[in-house]
Image: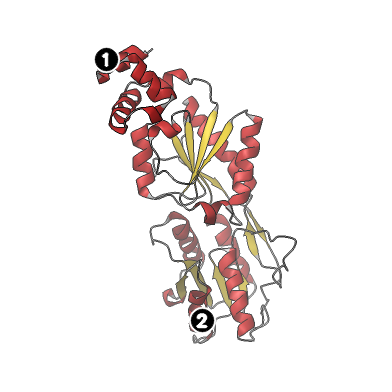
Amino acid sequence: MTTLKEIADKCDVSTSTVSLVLNKPYKISKDVRKKVYDSIIQMGYFKQKNQAIKQIGIVFDSFYKDFFGDFYNEVVYGILQKSSNLNFNIRILTDLNIDYYDIHDIQGLIFVGKTPNDFYDKVKQFRIPFINCGHPNYNHLEVPTAYLSRTANTKNLVQFLTNCGHEHIAVIVGENDPKDIIRKEFIDAIQEVKPNLDPNLIFEASYDEIQTVEIVWNKIISHSPKVTAVMCGNDLLAYYVYNCAKKYNIRIPEDISVTGFDGIHFPKFTNKPSPKLTTVYGNRIELGQRSIELIYSVLKGIPIEDKLIRSHGNLVIGDSVARL
């Protein structure tokens, strides 16, 4: 087992300096602190000390958007619930703009939501095991990831629309990289069931700006032949479509049908959108629980054959699709 003296010798400092770096880092200059922590990481000091799993960190790229959002607040609840059962402490990090001494007592990290590439680079320098929760990164497929897959239930949605007589279907997805795994699953599943889908009816819109949905909406309602159904990549886009339809006096589902994805819950103090949306409900609480199980497996060295751990959800038939 690595000792403080061995670390001190490697860094050419005193043992008391190493002790201060570990316990009162603010008393040591940044350069010395970095040199000591670099050696600590290389020599595996904390990995030796912390055999029992005590503290897990969850990290957000966009804290206020994701943590307080309709999707990830339930994911975090699942993380907290499962970690409580296993006696893990959870520490929430709003970003990774930190030094190693800030998180040296964290044994594993869960990246929640869409994670930028520089997060992976930084945490690899720290040598802290980590996983993704909610959104795979196609540049880092080696990272174990728990997420809600779009494949199976998107096919079910397309088949449902087809059975209801809808042939001319438009698609609205978020403004994401075309290689994004969730987006790709959604589009690929639609095209697998409906290979003749007009590529000009696949549109992008911003999750943050309803104006972009309205621009897309005008293209959809003016398209010939007439579009009878709109498939949205998530429920938020679908409810933006509801607002556009109301503004243009177009009825859902009498004039056009709409589907979503995710099954977002609305607070009791708000009016639920009407008609009830046909969507796919994903169990976000279970997703959070599975993320804790996944980081536990990583920390315990349990083999993970498939790095992408998929949840599939359930198709929920609402009142937003008309039978033609």
Query: Mark 1, mark 2: which one is toward the viewer?
Result: 1
**Location of residue 77 (image quadrant):** top right
Q: Which residue is mark 2?
A: 220
From where the camera sits, is residue 139 visible? no
The answer to which of 319 and 247 lies nearer the viewer is 247
Query: What residue sits 24% from the left and 18% below the top?
Result: 12
In which quadrant will I find the C terminus? Answer: bottom right
Is residue 243 visible from the viewing direction of this image?
yes
Direction from residue 65 to residue 125 in the image, left or right: left
Q: Which residue lies at the image location 47% right of the left edge and 56% below the top edge?
A: 182
| Sequence-first disc among 1 and 2 | 1
- Residue 185 in percent (x, y) is at 47, 57
Q: Disc 2 residue type? A: Ile
> Which of 184/107 is in front?
107
Number of residues whose C-alpha sits closer than 10 Å to that of mark 2, classed few (under 14), some (14–19) or many (20 or more): many
- Quadrant placement of the N terminus: top left
Residue 134, how many percent across, how many down? 52, 49
Q: Is residue 52 left or right of residue 9?
A: right
Q: Amino acid at mark 1?
A: Asp
Residue 85 has which mark?
A: none
Q: How is the image coloured?
A: secondary structure
Residue that mark 1 sits on: 9
Query: Crowding near pointer 1: few (<14 within 10 Å), some, many (20+)?
Result: few
Q: Residue at x 28, y 31 (%)?
A: 31
Residue 277 falls left or right of residue 169: right
Compared with 298, 196 (above or below) is below
Q: How many marks?
A: 2
Q: Viewed as shown, does residue 32 lie left or right of 302?
A: left
Q: CA distance from mark 1 to mark 2?
A: 69 Å
